[in-house]
Amino acid sequence: MTTSTLTDRYVWAAARSLPEAQRDEFGRELRERIGDVIDAHVERGAAPADAEHSALVELGDPLRLAASYVDRPLQLIGPKYFLTWWRLLKLLVAIVVPLAAAGVLLGQVASGADVGGIIGTTISTALAVFVNLCFWVTLVFAVLERSPGTAVPASTWTPEQLPQPRDDARAGRLGDLIASLVFLGVFAVAIVWQQFGVVWIGGERQPIPVLDPALWSFWIPYFLALIALEAVFAIVIYLRGWNWTMAGLNVLLNAAFTIPAVWLFVSGQLLAPEFVEAIGWPWGEASDVTVAVLLIAVIGVAVWDVVDGFIKAARNRGGSALGGY
């Protein structure tokens, strides 16, 4: 594994805050500028490593340098504490909001609240904590900015604070991983939850399941196992990226799920008879159209997922995060 130099880390840290269209040109110009400053220090007798460190100290915080490049003032609350405020706020939001949401979620589950109440309370609490964090942290820094007698020093930037360059391809896949795991988790919970009855019929509001309970003898455990394999597949895609082998496995997973699901649906084994009766299936004269639309939608989603996998495999070049600079 190639070790990134301080210059690599500095250029990456500065360029990542710019619009993508400006990063390449900015990266080249910044490298030339750093090289000139390093050469000046070396000519004065400094060792190359010390010259590089001194050059970056002289250039200052990379985010401030990038902001000046695009003429973007750092003045939400004032330039003196802006970067300190921004870094602290991001850190608090990343830590406090998930912890608050997790605590409320566990409390709601322990108290036996219904699914709707759990989701609503958790989301509203997370939003409330987020808003309060933004408000109070900003208020504190605004007061500090406008208090001439305060002796709170602004943060001093040093090259040691530079982050290691991130694999941009993996970072782009993180959103796909989170979305996939959330969807698969909700799907698995829904399959199990529906067994306890989500539709009510008759005057006594008797709950009935959506899927035929007979499927628990094989097919529902089969589909739950496939969901677990899909989750593992999503994690592997995040770690290794798309290639032709992963695209082929994606075809097999889609076929393993779609073909049995379509067969069970067409043969009348998928839905519980009580559920079919409760909703009046197949909805009168439009039944053929309804069935056709549902089948086309399910098969279309599977086909698109397969095609999308091959497209991503073809586009995957494994580029370096610093390759453009």
Image (cartoon, grey):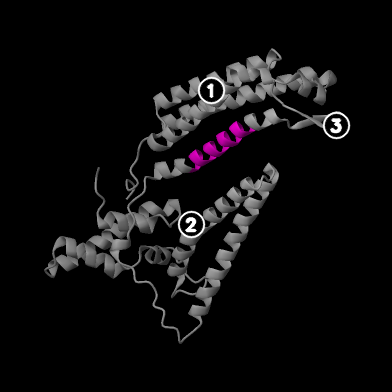
| The magenta stretch spans residue 177 | yes
Residue under circle 2? 95
Res. 100 image quadrant: bottom right
84 is higher (above) or lower (below) than 125 = below
Q: Give the image location of residue 272, x and y in percent.
A: 73, 21
Task: Measure the C-alpha gap from mark 3 to mark 1.
Answer: 40 Å
Q: Give the image location of residue 228, x and y in percent.
A: 51, 29
Crowd band around label 3 with a 10 angstrom C-alpha radius: few (<14), some (14–19), many (20+): few
Please state which of the two labelled residues, at mark 2 or mark 1, is closer to the viewer: 2
Residue under circle 1? 254
Considering only order in the chain, which callout, 2 or 3, is on the residue closer to the N terminus?
A: 2
Q: Which residue reaches farthest top?
A: 267
Q: Is residue 107 left or right of residue 34?
A: right
Residue under circle 3? 204
The N terminus - image quarter = top left
Chain part drawn in magenta:
175-190
Q: Give the image location of residue 71, x and y in percent.
A: 45, 66
Q: Main secondary structure of the magenta part?
A: helix
Callout 3 amino acid? Glu
Q: Residue at x 45, y 87 (%)?
A: 149
Q: Secondary structure at mark 1?
A: helix
281 is higher (above) or lower (below) than 27 = above
